[in-house]
Image (cartoon, helix red, strand yellow):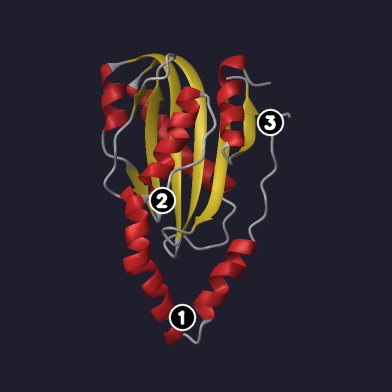
Amino acid sequence: MLAPELLSSARALRASGFTVVEVEPWAYVAVQSKWHWEMGTHLTLVLRVRRVGLLTAADARSGRDALRAIGDRWDPSKLPRGFQHARWLLDVIVCDQPDAEAQAFATGPTGKGAGSVLQTALVAPDGRVLVGSPVYGAMFWPKVRHAIDVVATQRPSPAPISTLGLVIGLLLIYPGLLILGLMCCGLPLIALPVLVLAEKDLPSALPP
């Protein structure tokens, strides 16, 4: 059973289009996996939200390291990462007292993998957020920051349009897909929607 302190944010994420797939007393995992038309790219956003008292840098690092296994388990996309599919893994920690090294870790460089980003965000009990703004994957940042803000405010809201993603999509991604489709007898243009539609819904672990 999820603690009341986290239940409100879990419900807010669900109302914002996420599926809560794992629930523990002081932690949960929420996933949103969808095609974003403005940027012509599929994004799987996986949040592990947890509540701690004192947060050390060692705990923040180990939490980020654990995200890879969580992402592998809960990413439902059939698209290969790096080909119109990205994965963003977030360790969102609601904490009373992060030490100085933990704060520096959260605002420092993000972790990177094959078509994926790993990031830590700290949320104070009053809703203040401490997180870095990454350059790598910047076109996804409005979606990512929105998810963090939903946890922090415990209020659902629609994700904003990514202005940078729209520019990149119109100038680079969609023209590139069209050219690739013409060179490959239209196969990529057929495969993309088929793989997107083949994605199965994740089971919800959050009670109504």
Q: Of 6 and 163, which appears nearest the observer?
A: 163
Report whether residue 137 is seen: no
Along the polypeptide, which appears first: circle 2 or circle 3?
A: 2
In percent of the image, x 57 and y 56: which residue is there?
77
- Image quadrant assignment for residue 53: top left
Residue 130, how many percent across, how many down? 33, 25
Q: Of 21 and 169, which appears nearest the observer?
A: 169
Report the quarter where the N terminus lies: top right
Residue picked out by circle 2: 116
Report whether residue 106 is seen: yes
What type is the residue that disc 3 sits on?
A: Leu
Check residue 206 in the rendering and tell me which mark sits there, or answer none. Answer: 3
Q: CA distance from mark 2 to mark 3?
A: 26 Å
In percent of the image, x 34 and y 51: which residue is there?
163
Count residues near mark 1 (Cα–Cα under 10 Å), then give few for <14, some for 14-19, many for 20+: some
Q: Of 46 and 111, which appears nearest the observer?
A: 46
What type is the residue that disc 1 sits on?
A: Gly
Q: CA distance from mark 2 to mark 1?
A: 25 Å
Along the polypeptide, which appears first: circle 2 or circle 1?
A: 2
What type is the residue that disc 2 sits on?
A: Ser
Residue picked out by circle 1: 181
Disc 2 versus disc 3: nearer the observer: 3
Disc 3 versus disc 1: nearer the observer: 1
